[in-house]
Amino acid sequence: MSTTSRTPALRRDKQLAMWRRAMRSMPGGTNSNFRAWGEDTVYVDRGKGGRVWDIDGNEYIDLRMGYGPAILGHADDRVDDHVNERMRLGSAFSLTSEDEVRVAELIKELTGWVEMVRMTVSGTEATMHAMRLARAYTGRTKIVKFEGQYHGVHDYALISVTPDVMDELGDRDNPVGLVWGRGIPQAIAETIIPAPFSDLDFLRRLFERQGEQIAAVIVEPVLGNAQAIQPRPGFHQGLRALTREFGILLHYDEVKTGFRLAKGGAAEYFGVTPDIASYAKAMGNGYPAAAFGGTREVMSMLPEKMSHGGTYAGNRVAAAAACKTLEILRDTDALDTIRRTGERVQAGLSQVIESRGLPYVFTGHPSMFGIMFTEQVPHEYRDWAKSDHDLYDAVAVGMQARGAMPEPDSREPWFICEAHAEGDQVDRIVSIFADALDAALETRAHLQPRGVQTGTAG
Ligand SMILES: Cc1ncc(COP(=O)(O)O)c(C=O)c1O
C-alpha cells in the first residue's frame, strides 16, 4: 500500500473557505506570522483539556498547547469559573485590584527569589520592559542574547532568532546580529550582541572585551524555541558567576519555562538565582497574563526612574486567571502529573524509534521536550541543523493527519498539560507517532535511490 493511500485525509472544506475569507482581511489569514500555514492554516473551533477541534470537526490531541500557556489544559473549569466570577466586577479600570497584588505575592512565593513584580499583557512586553530595566539599573546599553532564542516580537528581541541556514549567523567565534525581517533600525540591532548558547569561554572573552558596555545577558534557560535544547552541565552556574564578576545582570526569560519546569521555574530547576525574570504563558493558563520581576534592588528603578505602564497591564481577567492558575500549580501535584505524563510519552516514543533502528535524542524537560533524530546531544542552536529535522517535520505533518498536533516545525517542542494524563491520550500519541514515522520512512524509501545514506540533514 502506498504511503499516500495510508495517510488519512483531514476534512478541510470549511477551513479552506475560512482561509480564503480571512486572506481578504488579514495578512496570511491570521493574527500571527507563526500561525500562517498557507492553505494548511488551521482554524480552531474549541479546545477542552488536552484536545482541540478545528471548524471542520477534526479532533486532535494538542501537543502545541498554544505554544505553552495551557498548562492545565484548554478551558480548565477551575480557572474559567474563577475568571468568570471576577470579570463580572469589571475588567479595565486603570486602577489596581487585589487580584494583581495576589499575583505578585504568588510569584514571589513560588519563585522564592523574586521580590517585586509588575504585570504586563504579553511575554513580548515582559522581556521588553525587563531589558529596559537592566539598562536603567546599570546605565549600560548592550544586551547579550543567545542564538536560537526567542524573546518576543519587539525590536530588541528579533536578532539571531531562528534562521534555517546556519551560515546566516556568521562565524561562530564572531557571530553576526542577524535581523529577523525588515523595519528594525540598525542602531537598535547593534545594541544586541549575539552569542552561541552554552559556551562560557566565548562569554568570558566577550566580557573581557566589552563587559563595561553590557547591561544584561538575557537567556531562555533551555532553548524553548529550538527543541528545548539544554545547556552543557554547569553552564547556568558558570553564567551566574561570570555575570556577577563583570557587574552584568542576569535576565532569565522564563516565558516558556516559568511555573513549568518547577514551581519556581527554571531558576529553581537549575538552582540559580538571576536578577530579573520575565514570565507569561503558564502563569495564566491561556489568558493574556504576563509579568516581569526581580530583586528589590533592581526593581527599585520603578516607578520613579524608568517608564512602564499599560492600559491592560494587570487587567482583571488576566490577574484573576493568573491567581487561580498559580494557586493550582502551588497547591496541587499538577506539575508532577505533567512531568510523569511527559515521561510516559517519551518511554513510548523511545520504544517506537529504537525498534526502527533510528538515532534520536530527547531534548528539554518531559513537560516540554523536543525529539531530534541525531546521535549527537545538542547544546546550542547550530546543532539543530545537524539533526534530521526533515524527517521530524514529515512525522509532525503525518501526526496531524492522524489526530495529534505537534507544531509542523521541529524547533517547537511538544507541550504536555495536566489534562493529557486523562484517558488513553498517552497511548494514542505514541501509536499516532508510530504510524506517522512509518509513513515518513516509507515515503523517504520511495524517494531515495538505493545506496544513498539518509543520515542527518547537515
Ligand atoms: C521565551 C519567550 N519569550 C518571550 C516570548 C514572547 O511572548 P508573547 O508571545 O506572549 O509575546 C515567547 C513566546 O513564545 C517566548 O517563548
Image: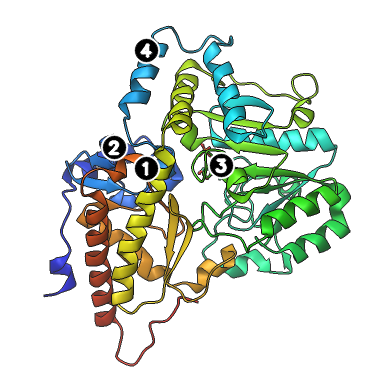
The secondary element bearing badge 3 is classed as: helix
Q: Amino acid at mark 1?
A: Cys
Which residue is at a point 26% across and 35% down the rendered structure image? 48
List the residue tagged with mark 2. 49
Q: Earlier in the sequence, mark 2 or mark 1?
A: 2
According to the picture, the residue beneath numbered tag 1 turns out to be 417
**What is the number of the mark on residue 224?**
none
- Look at the numbered disc 4 and give the secondary structure of its residue: helix
- Whichever of callouts 4 and 3 sits on the residue coming sooner in the sequence is 4
Give the crowd class for mark 2: few <14, some 14-19, many >=20 residues within 10 Å.
many
Work out whether mark 4 precedes mark 2 in sequence or the reverse, and give the earlier one. Answer: 2
Q: Is residue 278 left or right of residue 70?
A: right
Distance (Cα) linking label 1 and label 4: 24 Å
Res. 85 mark: 4
Q: Classify mark 4: residues with Cα within 10 Å, few (<14), some (14-19) or many (20+).
A: few
Q: Residue at x 32, y 37 (%)?
A: 22
Q: Position of residue 350 (x, y in %)?
A: 34, 67
Judge whether 423 appears above or below 87 on screen: below
Which residue is label 3 attached to?
265
Helix, strand or loop at label 2? It is loop
The amino acid at mark 4 is Glu
Q: Is residue 404 above or below residue 410?
A: above
Between 423 and 182, the one lying in front of the other is 423
Q: Up-down: is 232 above or below 374?
A: above
**Mark 2 or mark 3, which has the lower sequence index?**
2
Query: Disc 2, ligand 1: is the CB inside 8 Å?
Result: no
- Marks 2,1: beta carbons within 8 A: yes
- Of labels 3 and 1, earlier in sequence is 3
Residue 35 visible, this angle: no
